[in-house]
Image (cartoon, grey):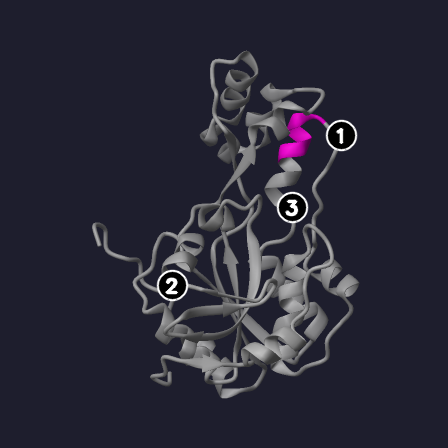
Amino acid sequence: MADAREFFTWSHQEARRMAMSQTGASNCGATALLNVLAALKVRIPSIGDAERAVHTNSRKRNVSVSEYLAARSVAGTTAEDIVAGCSTVAGEDVRSRFFSFYPPREVDLQRWLAGWLSQGCSAMATLNTQRMYGADYWHHQMIYGVSDAGVSVTNGIDDLSFDKIRLGLESPSTLQIHAPDALDCSPFDAEACDGLGEAWAAHGVTKQLLELQSGKSKAEYVYIPAAYNAGITIFARAGSAAWEELQRAPELPLLPEGS
């Protein structure tokens, strides 16, 4: 891979002009995919086709607490579904591969990203923005550049410092829900939540909810398992030298404990 430390697929001005912004509360994944395809200069499908291809899930309102939280845990889409959806909408033109960043990896993120972008690839970050800046969601953002200033992303256009983006990349698959959002649900079938799966029982979701309801807990959030895995997906034109290298690239090594 080329030993680059700075590369931009688009200039900041081009990103502001060309990048698409999401049109709904949960379609950031479809939006990121459209921006990736635009950067790779292949046919761009409609947002509706992209949403269906990546299996965009919506939040639910006016439902029981177990149904509300179950929907929140999968709202939007995952990087894995975006990889599959890319094959659906881009056919034989584009290939992609997801790289996990949790547990934390031993990698020079700046050089690693610049190396792929400089070969004509595009990239998308799947970030726990709750850890980064207290958002109410995880977020998929297309990456259009990297430099000493950080990682340049779309939707919204921003330069994320390496320290900030690592907060979102080095995250377990957990989602924090504002406690009032859960407590306002009716019926309040908290006991059903741990039955949604082993991860739900491991998070003690039923206990969290019952203690909030009784007043024993004053926690600001309810923590539930999330469908998302934090990391970066690299996209390449099929048949390109970059795709051949992407297939051969090893998984990123784990950061040694105590580093």
| Element class at badge 2 | helix
Q: Which residue is mark 3?
A: 75
Q: Nearer the viewer, residue 33 or 157?
A: 157
Residue at mark 2 to residue at mark 1: CA–CA distance? 39 Å
Mark 1: which amino acid? Asn
The answer to if 66 sits in the magenta stretch is: yes
Q: Which residue is mark 2?
A: 162
**Image quadrant where residue 150 sits:** bottom left
| Element class at badge 1 | loop
Up/down of 57 relative to 235, above or below: above
From the viewer's perspective, tell me whether residue 38 is left or right of residue 127: right
**Image quadrant where residue 254 sits:** bottom left
| Element class at badge 3 | loop
Q: Earlier in the sequence, mark 3 or mark 2?
A: 3
Mark 2: which amino acid? Phe
Mark 3: which amino acid? Ala
Magenta residues, start to end: 64-69
Give the residue displayed 45% in from the left and 81% down from the top: 7
Q: Which residue is mark 1?
A: 62
Question: Foreground mark, 1 or 3?
Answer: 1
Q: Earlier in the sequence, mark 2 or mark 1?
A: 1
Mark 1 crowd level (few <14, some 14–19, many ≥20, 10 Å Cα): few
